[in-house]
Image (cartoon, helix red, strand yellow):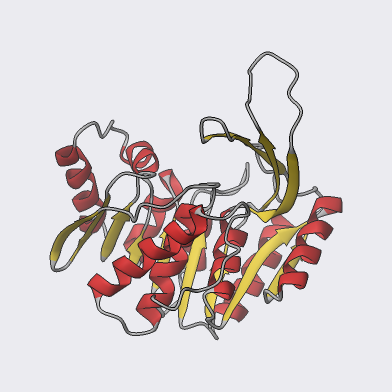
Amino acid sequence: MILAAGLTPAWQQILAFRRLRLGEVNRAEEVIGCASGKVLNVGCALHHLGTASHTLSPAGGTTGEMLRTDLAVLGVPATWIETQSSIRICTTLLDRSTGQTTELVENSAPLSAMELDAYRAKFVELAARARLIVISGSLPPGAPADFFASLLTEVTVPVLLDLRGPELLACLPRRPWLVKPNREELALTIGNPLATDDELLTAMHELRAKGAEYVVVSDGPHAVWAAGPNGVDCLTPPRVSVVNPIGCGDCLAAGLAVAWSEGRSWADTLHFGLATAAENARHLLPARFARGSGW
């Protein structure tokens, strides 16, 4: 199975407006909620892509119960670490007149040392049964920057990291199979603006020099760049009618993991990942889609 692991899930509230006017009273024409955050988006996408998978995530408070219920209804296999603090709520505002998406992000609450230890123990247990691991999302406040790196100490299977900043850099000596920041996250990690493609490629090669075998960088609807042992690729994402772009990066990560675990070539792995992200954009809820027959 593929293990999806992360520490910062969210309950996602999506409000769609015919036209959103800042500074005024706005009445949503549609409101819907779902379990989300990077780790749960990846877990849901893996499940809907038809691969054997398992998701490991914290869950606390009323919102934590909502996460558990939502994934249970979807049939997504998951293990939950109970936390004292409630899971955060993030809000997506969709302006249907312009297609613009606004994301209101609540920071995650800290996890106690005991909760982090419980997470670590369960990760080690599940990782021993995994054929590939996807770790995604940020660290909660107060968690050590090397927490994710410490999880990889005894991992022997390929690992895909959708991380940024110090937590990503700390993992690179563990030689992950693939790292997948977006362009903004890569700039934050490197500490330099990436205004040009040459600057972007330099930053990608820097991550490879530090230990990553492959580096894939997304940039919303713009080109996706990939660097690996056989060189550099630049791909144009498929054009689709976008309903909600939230979770596309997470679905890209899930698609890459599934395709690679199926033994596909690197070129096919990239195209499958992009197809997964594009399919996600066509749906209102993140990572809720059916695998296409042409994939």
Residue 109 in sight from this viewpoint: no
Q: Residue at x 85, y 52 (%)?
A: 61
Q: In the current view of this chain or complex, which residue is farthest to the top?
A: 23
Q: Position of residue 196 (x, y in %)?
A: 19, 34
- Identify which residue, 242 or 204, lies in the foreground: 242
Left or right of 119, for residue 156: left
Q: In the current view of this chain or complex, which residue is farthest to the right?
A: 62
Residue 153, image quadrant: bottom left
Question: Relative to 195, is 277 above or below?
Answer: below
Q: Residue at x 56, y 83 (%)?
A: 52
- Identify which residue, 91 or 138, lies in the foreground: 91
Residue 54, image quadrant: bottom right
Q: Position of residue 25 (x, y in %)?
A: 75, 18
How many marks overall? Answer: 0
Q: Position of residue 220 (x, y in %)?
A: 39, 44
Left or right of 263, for residue 44: right
Residue 144 in sight from this viewpoint: yes
Q: Residue at x 36, y 59 (%)?
A: 179
Q: Position of residue 141 (x, y in %)?
A: 63, 41
Left or right of 245, for residue 13: right
Left or right of 138, for residue 275: left
Question: Relative to 103, is 20 above or below?
Answer: above
> Which quadrant: the C terminus?
bottom left
